[in-house]
Amino acid sequence: MGRMTFNPGELADSLSETAGYKAGLALSIEELCEHLSGTEYPDTIRSSEKYGASLRSEEYEILFYKLLYNIGYTAEEYDGDYTGAKYFHKYRHTALEQWAGVTNLFVEIWPKLVEATLASGSKSVDPSPFMRAAFDKYGRLGLDMAMERLDVLEKALNLNPHSIQRYVEWHSPVQLESLFKGTKDKPEFGRFIDQRYIDYLCKNDDRIGAIHWRKFEEFTAEFFHREGYTVELGPGSNDDGVDVRIWKDGQTTTENPHCLVQCKRQRDKVERVVVKGLFADVSFEGADLGLVVTTSELSPGARSTISARGYPIQEIERKGLAEWLRKLRTPGTGIIRV
């Protein structure tokens, strides 16, 4: 492969624009460097702002794949394998003949499928004829190999920074800084908070305590919405201490809520005055229970008060939040399936 030459300021712009196009997340120079820390790339990027840079094409790709992984777009760091080499090594001692046969079927059938797709005006290739041929000739093993071959192709097209193909046709990228500074923009993918922020936080869950307080409330509301509850997110101010109201499936919002949620995005432990106030709200609204969702944890005094007085109040802290993120994360490579 050849080299890619960047004039001063172009390397960071290229990375930011390509990440925005592919992953839908816009990053500043400092955010690029932060998410590539532990490598030599931050120094390269900062230096390139003044002096430009020259990178081998494959080096640029490695840098880009690491960035996609570190911002949560891919579940694992893509290895850039667009030939299926890893599967060759997987089958070389056990089923090399079958792998070669499936590869030959792919070479024979796939161009015809692409040609038929273009002729029909469709944008999506139907892979079933290739998969059926592999199954007919090699059984279940052949079908598995066909799916692996398609996985190689899919990732090569959608993740490669030099390809214009991408998994999702974003309307526009979202600014990463808005997760931490706040924004009133409606999410493009999600009811309360954009899926791109969830995927980012799943990879960077140590930063959840730093996100904007309103984004923390939106994340909490999104979780219960995805769990099938009817959810009302409070106004964010003058909410009388109730950030989220939740009704069970089958209930209407004219009925007493099932649960009242108090969100506490803070470092200090949540003190007993909070649980006392939440219990008062639960009693006043006739809710079944109250929930404190926090990036910290309840203080010993708060837990003692709940236990001693029998308050119907539960807690979700950092470990629980990480589990929520894993449940909400887009499966696999960042393909939106909300």
Image: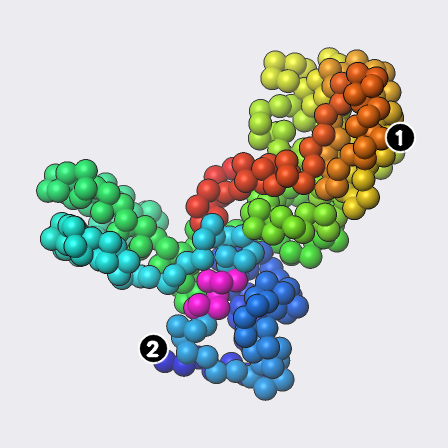
Label 2 belongs to which residue? 1
The residue that mark 1 highlights is 273
Q: Position of residue 154 (x, y in %)?
A: 34, 53
Q: Residue at x 85, y 37 (%)?
A: 237
Is residue 225 within the magenta segment?
Answer: no
Would you place residue 249 above or below residue 303 in this image?
A: above
**Count of numbered badges drawn on the protein:** 2
Circle on res. 294: none
Name which quarter of the figure residue 297 lies in.
Answer: top right
Residue 14 place in picture, x, y as percent: 53, 71
Q: Which residues are magenta?
A: 61-67
- Residue 66 within the magenta-colored segment of the rendering: yes
Specify whether 178 is left or right of 61. Answer: right
Q: Is residue 121 visible?
A: no
Q: Nearer the viewer, mark 2 or mark 1?
A: 1
Main secondary structure found in the magenta portion: helix
Residue 137 left/right relative to 287: left
Q: Residues within 10 Å of mark 1 (few under 14, many from 20)?
A: few
Structural crowding at the residue carrying mark 2, measured as other residues with C-alpha within 10 Å and reported as few (<14), some (14–19) or many (≥20): few
Query: Sequence order check: which comes first, mark 2 or mark 1?
Result: 2
Q: Which residue is pictured at 72% across the width and 42% down the height? A: 295
Task: For mark 2, give the secondary structure.
Answer: loop
- x then y, percent, for residue 283: 83, 15
- Cα–Cα gap, marks 2 and 1: 64 Å
Instruction: Name which residue lies at 79% across and 46% down.
Output: 267
Circles 2 and 1: CB distance less than 8 Å? no
Q: Please identify the quadrant where the N terminus is shown.
A: bottom left
Q: Amino acid at mark 2?
A: Met
